[in-house]
Amino acid sequence: MQITSPTFKDNAAKALADAQLQKALGNVRAGFIDKRQKAADALPEFEALRDAARDIKNHTLAHLDLYLETYAEKVEAAGGQVHWAETAEDARNRILEICRRLGAKTVTKGKSMITEEIGLNAFFEEHGVTPVETDLGEYIIQLRGEHPSHIIAPAVHLNKEQVEEDFRRVHTHLDPSRNLDEPTSLLGEARAVLREKYFQADVGITGANFLVAETGTSIIVTNEGNGDLTQTLPKAHIVVASIEKIVPTLEDVSQILRVLARSATGQDMSVYTTFSTGPRRDEDPDGPGEYHVILLDNGRSAMLGTEYQEMLRCIRCGACMNHCPVYHAVGGHAYGWVYPGPMGAVLTPSLVGVDKAGHLPNASTFCGRCESVCPMRIPLPKMMRHWREREFERNLNSAVARYGLGLWAFFAKRPALYQFATGTAMRLLGAIGKGKGRFAALPLAGGWTRHRDLPAPEGKTFQSQWAERQKKMKAKAA
Amino acid sequence: MTEASPSGPAKAPRVGLFVTCLVDLFRPNVGFAAVKLLEDAGCVVEVPQAQTCCGQPAFNSGDRKDARDIAEQTIRALENYDYVVAPSGSCAGMLKKHYPELFEDDPVWHGRAERFSAKVFELVSFLADVLGVTSVEASFNGSVTYHDSCSGLRELGIKGQPRKLLKSVQGLELKEMKDPDVCCGFGGTFCVKYPDISNKIVSEKTRAIRDAGAGTLLAGDLGCLMNMAGKLKREGSAIEVRHVAEVLAGMGDQPAIGEKAKG
Ligand code: SF4
């Protein structure tokens, strides 16, 4: 997937001017926040579970090599195969090899951000394999040739009317006079169309929410059940997952599951939680003949032992973006790569480089709402600040910004000079601004005054007035 | 403080006021309101001259070196008081939460920063939580709505304290806005680095403020207040904007933020 993070500002400007998008983004604000709050309030141990979830992942990351090896052994013991992929390219090639060997023409896919990360759909199409997204949101954006704008609600940037238009454009075999007014009729139509595809597919690909070291199991949570059909009907099931999805035991998973859906959608549990361990056994009534796991690193192991390690606790619940004022303003596509919102602002620079993704950790007010809702207690603002430090060290921020900051710091570190200079400047500004009490425009303050007035200073600084007061008090006392 | 303790009259706590750069430069009235509130509560207030800014612009721009230099300067200026109080959740949060972080790898300064940070409080929460103030002697004729600034709310847990004290102000009616805990879009340098996004966020905020139907907007952070006042004025709104300390100190008759002097 092409990275447009370097043009974040332009992307954002476009998003802000897009009336359709702005309407759809209203749904994010209205839909997710109250539901999460209610779910959290209804569970007395919710905060304690967040601590437990954090601790489980911290423990796992501290022993990641051990758990990955154990997991791989268990997968193989259950008759599956593990493929270690260091890069996106490695992962794509391994997947294509399997598909080619099985003569696969059509591949069904459950919702997977990792396959977005490795650009699998475009790669498949280049190599004559047809990918079919089976999650409703993913299916819609595939029809539109777009990418997900949210990690759990890929088509959240769209309105119902846009989806109806797409369905009428693509599903030409259906009665043009059919009624698609209700969201349920859209879902019904997508289901009917997709049902055919499940049976045509030779390979089914899913992501994983968790990989369990104890049992070699991969787990997905969905609300549509599409993942189940994707992975049981075809000849082979390929799980594509990144290495930090590992969790030691089923007991650990059950703890984290209790915070996942509540944080994501406000549900107690997602509708489907599907466990798969190895291929079909002789006594099983159905299931895939082959079971493969692509274990992707793609830059993650390089985050271990750095200030970004905590990001690897992320369980992709989406709560951080659901609560982010910047995400609410510009939507997911503006971020310019796979992962949007606060989690993307930390993860994207780790995976593609801060030189390309530098805007993302900067475009935050540090309001801290993401961290306050993150079920894994990831200190997202702190890590965004660490990216700003890396940028600053490497001189990546603009010369104007550096110059301004340097000048400000020069004075801020010299209190006497600072008070002299500000005392004079504020008296001047105060005198100019006195007439209206504010400025509609001011040299060098265009960033501020483009959209709002700048309140004028009172005139004398506090420090100068305080000094006068002290002098008077001393005189009185004398 | 007037109550006598068993060992004789309690010694008045010495408070070093960290004025904050925005209050110093733009709205000294807030500083004097803070002094009045602290003195009324029995503190002896001093304002060391060797302070400038808390260093957030450097810290949040990734310039750790300058942030540390400024932190050292602030600690030196204020560490010998019983308490250090700032009329801003964001600056108090910087002194209390982030100064120790800045010195994580410095064995000498880290302990010093931690001892310092233990004494630091935001003004309103200091009055309510530390000094046990439950009411103020002030009156204000009108309705207000209160915005929870992000750092104060999420780093320092300030939410109930200002509301409780505001309720004791005679004649004041509190009308809550929708989502008072959502960011106003200021974000320090964010608002000038990403003006269009900041504008969108503050526009949502001013809508909530206008819908609340109060005559005055209050908050505990001057940066946020200047942002919201600037937007309200640009929109032609007549809503007045003030720092919560000004109203609590009974000093709410000064021209509001962004308004010209009357007369
Ligand atoms: S960073 Fe936290 S809130 Fe955001 S997606 Fe990951 S786990 Fe969820």
Image (cartoon, coloured by chain):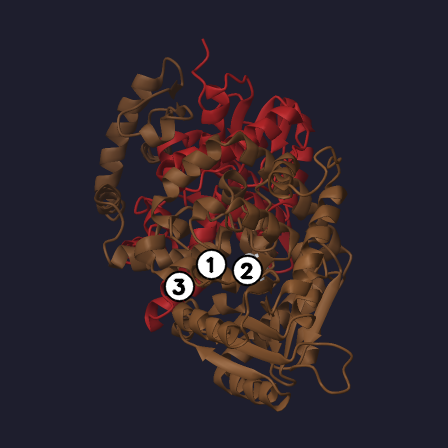
Earlier along the polypeptide chain: callout 3 or callout 1?
A: 1
Asked if disc 2 and disc 1 are in contact, CB closer than 8 Å, the reply is yes
Instruction: Inspect the image, locate mark 1, and give the three-letter code of the amino acid beneath it.
Output: Glu
Relative depth, front residue between B54 and A317: A317
Q: Secondary structure at mark 2?
A: strand
Quick check: is the Cβ at mark 1 less than 8 Å away from ligand 1? no
Q: Is residue B132 left or right of residue A178?
A: left
Count of numbered labels shown in the rendering: 3
Q: CA distance from mark 2 to mark 3?
A: 25 Å
Asked if disc 2 and disc 3 are in contact, CB closer than 8 Å, the reply is no
Q: Quadrant of residue A279?
A: bottom right
Residue at screen point 41% across, 30% down: B27
Q: Secondary structure at mark 3?
A: helix
Q: Position of residue A334 (x, y in %)?
A: 45, 44
Relative depth, front residue between A258 and A333: A333
Q: Which residue is mark 3?
A: A351
Mark in the foreground, 2 or 3: 2
Ligand 1 positioned in quadrant? bottom right
Earlier along the polypeptide chain: callout 2 or callout 1?
A: 1
Q: Which residue is mark 1?
A: A125
The chain letter under disc 1 is: A
Residue at screen point 69% across, 58% down: A196
Q: Which residue is mark 2?
A: A131
Reply above or below: B2 against B7: above
The chain letter under disc 3 is: A
Instruction: Inspect the image, locate mark 2, and give the three-letter code of the amino acid beneath it.
Output: Pro
Quick check: is the Cβ at mark 2 less than 8 Å away from ligand 1? no
Chain A on-screen colour:
brown
Residue at screen point 55% across, 75% down: A102
